[in-house]
C-alpha cells in the first residue's frame, strides 16, 4: 500500500512539473556530493538507519512495569518485620521509595 501511494505521488509530481523544473530541484530528493559513490552512500544510509532504529527502540516505553513489593516503602524484610525494630502496625511509612505499576 505504501509503495503504491509513493508511486502515485511520484507520477503526480512528474505530471505537475516540467522536465527542467524536475531536473533543477530533483523534486526535493537529496543527492550525493561529488566524491561519494552510490555504494558509499548506501553504506552510510544503512549505518545511519541502524542508529536511528536503535535510538527509537531504546527510548520506547517498557510495556511491562517492574513489580515491587509495596512494603519496600515500609523498610520491611521478606518476613514482614520492620527493619528498624518498631512493631509492624500495618500502616505504610511514606518516607521510603515505593514503586507501583
Image (cartoon, rainbow, N blue to C red):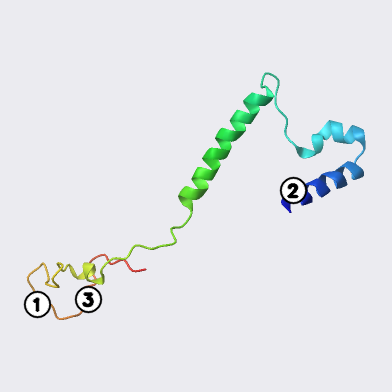
Of the image marks 2 and 3, the number of the one nearer the N terminus: 2
Circle 2 SS class? helix
Image side of residue 91 versus residue 37, left or right: left
Circle 1 SS class? loop
Image vertical order of residue 95 relative to residue 26, above or below: below
Q: Indicate the quadrant where residue 64 lies.
A: bottom left
Report the Cα–Cα distance between label 2 and label 3. Answer: 58 Å
Residue projecting furthest to the left = 85
Of the image marks 1 and 2, the number of the one nearer the N terminus: 2
Report the Cα–Cα distance between label 3 and label 1. Answer: 12 Å
Circle 3 SS class? loop
Q: Indicate the quadrant where residue 13 lies.
A: top right
Picture disc at residue 18: none
**Residue located 17% across and 67% down the image:** 75
Badge 2: how crowded within 10 Å, few (<14), some, or many (20+)?
A: few
Badge 1: how crowded within 10 Å, few (<14), some, or many (20+)?
A: few
Of the image marks 3 and 1, the number of the one nearer the N terminus: 1
Image side of residue 5 versus residue 70, left or right: right
Image side of residue 28 versus residue 16, left or right: left
Image vertical order of residue 37 relative to residue 21, above or below: above
Image vertical order of residue 37 relative to residue 79, above or below: above
**Residue located 18% across and 80% down the image:** 90
Q: For the N terminus, which image quadrant?
A: bottom right
**Residue located 34% across and 62% down the image:** 66
Label 1: which residue?
87
Label 2: which residue?
3
Image coords of residue 89 (percent x, y): 14, 81
- Foreground residue, 45 or 33? 45
Image vertical order of residue 99 relative to residue 49, above or below: below
Q: Are marks 2 and 3 in contact (CB under 8 Å)?
A: no
Label 3: which residue?
92
Q: Nearer the viewer, mark 1 or mark 2?
A: 2
Amino acid at each position: 500500500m505504501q509503495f503504491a501511494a509513493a508511486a502515485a505521488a511520484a507520477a503526480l509530481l512528474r505530471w505537475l512539473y516540467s522536465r527542467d523544473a524536475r531536473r533543477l530541484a530533483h523534486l526535493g530528493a537529496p543527492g550525493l556530493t561529488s566524491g561519494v559513490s552510490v555504494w558509499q552512500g548506501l553504506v552510510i544510509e544503512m549505518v545511519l538507519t541502524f542508529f536511528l532504529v536503535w535510538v527509537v527502540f531504546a527510548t520506547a516505553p517498557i510495556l511491562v512495569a517492574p513489580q515491587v513489593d509495596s512494603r519496600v516503602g515500609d523498610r520491611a524484610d521478606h518476613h514482614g518485620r520492620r527493619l528498624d525494630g518498631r512493631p509492624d502496625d500495618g500502616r505504610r511509612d511514606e518516607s521510603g521509595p515505593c514503586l507501583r505499576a
